């Protein structure tokens, strides 16, 4: 799976939230200074080429929608991170974050339970 650039991820966050939108509606979701229309349009077309976004033609315009859910992307992204940085071990990943963030035992148990639930899906 291809990973999103920061700019692509910002566009995807908007599309995941709105579920579908025209380029002008995507731009409206950004804080000032808003990105240029051509910039957003180009990024959306790149996302479409990468298989993250689809569109429906509405007259001369396109209404874009995500083809991959935020959850599915997050899951694939985390699998990649665990594989590349923690030798595929979720235990090593949790240990790293526990040490770096000074997590409590109850917080660790919550994380482990969530990981077990996701693993069983």
Image: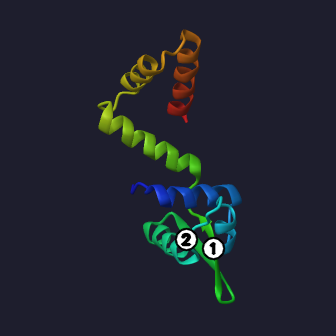
Task: Name the residue nearer the viewer: 104 or 94.
Answer: 104
Side of 78 relative to 118 (left or right): left
Q: Quadrant of the N terminus?
A: bottom left
Reading the image, the residue beneath label 1 is 23
Numbered circle sitting on residue 40: 2
Residue 58 visible at all: yes
> Tag 2's secondary structure?
helix
The answer to whether 63 is drawn above or below residue 1 in the figure is below
Numbered circle sitting on residue 77: none
Q: Where is residue 27, by image quadrant?
A: bottom right
Residue located at (57% from left, 28% from top): 117
Dots 1 and 2: beta carbons under 8 Å?
yes
Residue 24 screen position, x and y as percent? 67, 74
Q: Where is residue 34, by image quadrant?
A: bottom right
> Tag 1's secondary structure?
helix
Residue located at (53% from left, 70% from top): 44
Distance from the alpha carbon under mark 1 to that under mark 2: 7 Å
Residue 22 visible at all: no
Residue located at (54% from left, 23% from top): 111
């Amino acid at each position: 799976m291809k990973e999103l650039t920061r700019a692509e991820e910002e566009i995807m966050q908007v599309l995941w939230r709105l579920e579908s939108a025209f380029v002008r509606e995507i731009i409206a979701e950004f804080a000032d200074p808003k990105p240029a229309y051509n910039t957003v349009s180009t990024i959306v077309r790149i996302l479409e080429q990468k298989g993250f976004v689809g569109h429906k033609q509405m007259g001369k315009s396109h209404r874009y929608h995500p083809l991959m859910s935020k959850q599915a992307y997050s899951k694939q992204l985390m699998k990649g991170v665990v594989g590349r940085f923690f030798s595929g071990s979720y235990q090593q990943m949790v240990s790293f974050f526990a040490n770096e963030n000074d997590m409590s035992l109850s917080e660790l148990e919550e994380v482990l339970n969530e990981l077990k639930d996701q693993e069983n899906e």
